[in-house]
């Protein structure tokens, strides 16, 4: 294989996970290719926490809005404000612009970018992996030769389905949203709706993007009309008459795969690895962290020649965030199961301890280890709601 055709790694997928992995590998001095479909925009509320902005050096001009409070809306219309205290905020980005920025940045650090559709992997002698793809706008097939592959190609992950056992059995929520023009009177509106008619097992949302807003819904229930739910939400708010800019839909995984690598030459990252937070559906921070951990594991594999290094990405991620994912999974399973429970869930959010600890956990991406008294109070308040002892 001639030197000019050889890559240390090929990253399939140019979303936050893939672009981050490609950038980090390029910065580490590895010859890396980034294969991206180009033009696809993932349906996403676009929320990024302060830790992401810090850890991944995100420029402020990418933020379309700065959310300082969220409104939780119960099935009966009870509205609970959850302000962020201490001057903090959650940044909101438009994925069309944000993802392209990440791809451009990876390219500026030396990643070689290819635009096209992934087809399959084959192998040649000498440990060479061949990535087959169709260039954008073309009908012919081309190939990239590499030592290792990172599959960051989304929830349905063609790379993972070919190479990783169990990658085709990930539980998913299907998300759909419409990007609409923002009314002048509500530029930073952030609302989350918990109601079975809008989503029988997840939630609906209105998130600000500056001049536009994301109005969306998610559900794993087969046959449930996501488009109908978005139309209903727009109809009962002041967004029904606002111009629609674009519409997008996609599956979102809600459980990390048990294995992210094939023990040989392929490693998954981001949605392909299933690392989207249950309950909230948050994925951008976890995708970028997953991309970074994948790059570290690939770099170590290249340095040592030991394919077992690929498993480090999952081990490190689950050590840092596995407990949070487990807790959020239980929350989604219980609180989203009926409108009665959703009503109690929203009312619990009135509690100042709940609000403070929720925002601390979200913004810093770790469970607060201080203030055990507050956590104990929350536990007993939750128990009171479960036993229907709390006032309604």
Image (spheres, rainbow, N blue to C red):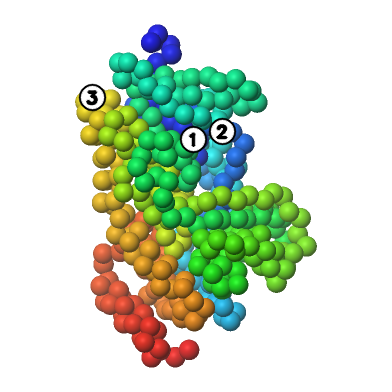
Locate residue 333 relative to residue 78 in the image: left or right.
Answer: left
**Depth check: 214 or 125 in front?**
125
Mark 3 packing: few (<14 Cα in 10 Å), some, or many (20+)? few
Callout 2 touching callout 1 (CB < 8 Å) = yes
Q: Tag 2, which secondary structure?
A: loop
Locate residue 199 relative to residue 277 in the image: left or right.
Answer: right
Q: Quadrant of residue 171?
A: bottom left
Identify the residue position indicated by label 1 in the image.
13
Q: In which quarter of the image is residue 10?
A: top left
Identify the residue position indicated by label 3 in the image.
305
Q: Which residue is drawn at 51% across and 65% down?
A: 202
Where residue 125 sits: x, y (%)?
32, 16
Numbered circle sitting on residue 37:
2
Q: Tag 3, which secondary structure?
A: loop
Q: Residue at x 41, y 24 (%)?
A: 122
Q: Can residue 383 be seen in this view?
A: yes
Where residue 11 sits: x, y (%)?
43, 31
Q: In this view, does 198 lie above or below 76?
A: above
Q: Which residue is drawn at 40% across and 73% down?
A: 334
Q: How far apart are marks 1 and 3 (CA)?
A: 24 Å
Q: Is residue 118 above or below residue 92?
A: above
Where residue 70 sits: x, y (%)?
53, 67
């Amino acid at each position: 294989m001639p030197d000019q055709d050889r890559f240390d790694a090929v990253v399939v997928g140019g979303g936050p996970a893939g672009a981050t992995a490609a950038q980090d590998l390029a910065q580490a001095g590895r010859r890396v290719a980034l294969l991206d479909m180009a033009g696809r925009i993932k349906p996403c509320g676009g929320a990024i926490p302060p830790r992401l902005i810090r850890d991944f050096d995100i420029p402020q001009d990418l933020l379309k809005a700065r959310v300082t409070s969220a409104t939780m809306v119960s099935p009966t219309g009870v509205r609970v404000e959850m302000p962020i205290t201490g001057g903090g905020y959650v940044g909101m980005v438009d994925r069309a612009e944000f993802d392209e920025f990440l791809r451009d940045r990876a390219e500026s650090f030396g990643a070689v970018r290819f635009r096209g559709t992934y087809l399959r992997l084959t192998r040649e002698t000498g440990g060479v992996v061949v990535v087959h793809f169709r260039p954008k706008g073309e009908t012919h097939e081309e190939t990239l030769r590499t030592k290792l592959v990172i599959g960051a190609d989304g929830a349905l992950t063609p790379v993972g389905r070919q190479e990783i056992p169990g990658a085709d059995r990930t539980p998913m929520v299907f998300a759909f949203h419409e990007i609409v023009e923002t009314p002048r009177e509500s530029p930073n509106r952030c609302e989350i709706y918990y109601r079975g008619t809008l989503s029988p097992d997840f939630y609906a949302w209105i998130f600000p993007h500056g001049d536009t807003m994301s109005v969306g819904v998610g559900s794993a229930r087969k046959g449930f009309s996501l488009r109908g739910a978005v139309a209903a939400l727009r109809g009962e708010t002041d967004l029904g008459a606002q111009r629609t800019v674009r519409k997008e839909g996609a599956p979102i995984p809600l459980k990390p795969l048990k294995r992210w690598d094939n023990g040989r030459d392929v490693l998954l990252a981001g949605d392909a690895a299933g690392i989207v937070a249950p309950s909230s559906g948050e994925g951008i921070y976890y995708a970028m962290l997953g991309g970074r951990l994948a790059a570290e594991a690939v770099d170590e594999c290249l340095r040592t020649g030991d394919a077992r290094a690929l498993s480090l990405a999952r081990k490190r991620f689950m050590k840092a965030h596995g407990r949070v994912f487990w807790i959020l999974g239980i929350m989604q399973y219980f609180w989203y199961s009926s409108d009665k429970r959703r009503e109690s869930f929203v009312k619990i959010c009135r509690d100042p301890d709940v609000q403070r600890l929720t925002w601390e956990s979200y913004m810093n991406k770790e469970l607060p280890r201080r203030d055990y008294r507050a956590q104990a109070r929350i536990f007993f308040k939750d128990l009171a709601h479960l036993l229907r002892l709390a006032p309604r």
